[in-house]
Image (cartoon, rainbow, N blue to C red):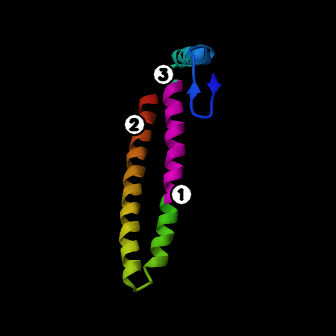
């Protein structure tokens, strides 16, 4: 690669090693995925969903705190914020419910 003040020249040599590395990493990752049992993959998925669920529950807690704080303020701006936060809370509750349902389905598949 040559860098000039007005242009950068890139040759195929600049990327030849990079391609080999990425292909090797992909192959290693594919081998790892193939060697996992279905049970292990389900358990890994459950763990990831539980982490996501925990993050969403924390977000919901923060939104609920803001809703409580704004609900006592009588001005129009607070009412608009309250409506927006209520929509966010509803969206988070929906996501939490969907993830909980999926976790239960996966746990049932393991049983």
Q: Who comes first in sequence, dot 1 or dot 2?
A: 1
Res. 26 in view:
yes
Residue 52 x %, y %: 51, 45
Residue 92 x %, y %: 41, 56
Q: Is residue 44 left or right of residue 101?
A: right
Measured in 3D between alpha carbons, the distance from the residue under mark 1 to the one under mark 3, in whole angstroms, is 30 Å
Residue 29 x %, y %: 56, 19
Residue position marked by numbered label 3 in the rendering = 38
Q: Residue at x 58, y 28 (%)?
A: 8
Within-10-Å neighbours for mark 3: few <14, some 14–19, many 20+: few
Q: Residue at x 41, y 67 (%)?
A: 85
Residue stretch in magenta: 40-59
Q: Who comes first in sequence, dot 2 or dot 3?
A: 3
Residue 70 x %, y %: 45, 78
Residue position marked by numbered label 1 in the rendering = 58
Which residue occupies the foreground of this view, 30 or 101? 30
């Amino acid at each position: 690669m040559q860098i000039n003040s007005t242009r950068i020249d890139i040759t195929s040599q600049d990327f030849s090693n990079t391609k080999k590395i990425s292909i090797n990493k992909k192959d290693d990752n594919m081998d790892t995925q193939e060697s996992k049992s279905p049970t292990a993959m389900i358990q890994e998925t459950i763990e990831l969903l539980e982490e996501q669920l925990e993050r969403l529950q924390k977000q919901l807690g923060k939104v609920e705190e803001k809703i409580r704080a704004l609900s006592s303020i009588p001005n129009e701006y607070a009412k608009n914020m309250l409506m927006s936060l209520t929509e966010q809370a509803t969206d988070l509750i929906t996501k939490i419910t969907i993830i909980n349902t999926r976790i239960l389905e996966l746990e049932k598949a393991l049983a």
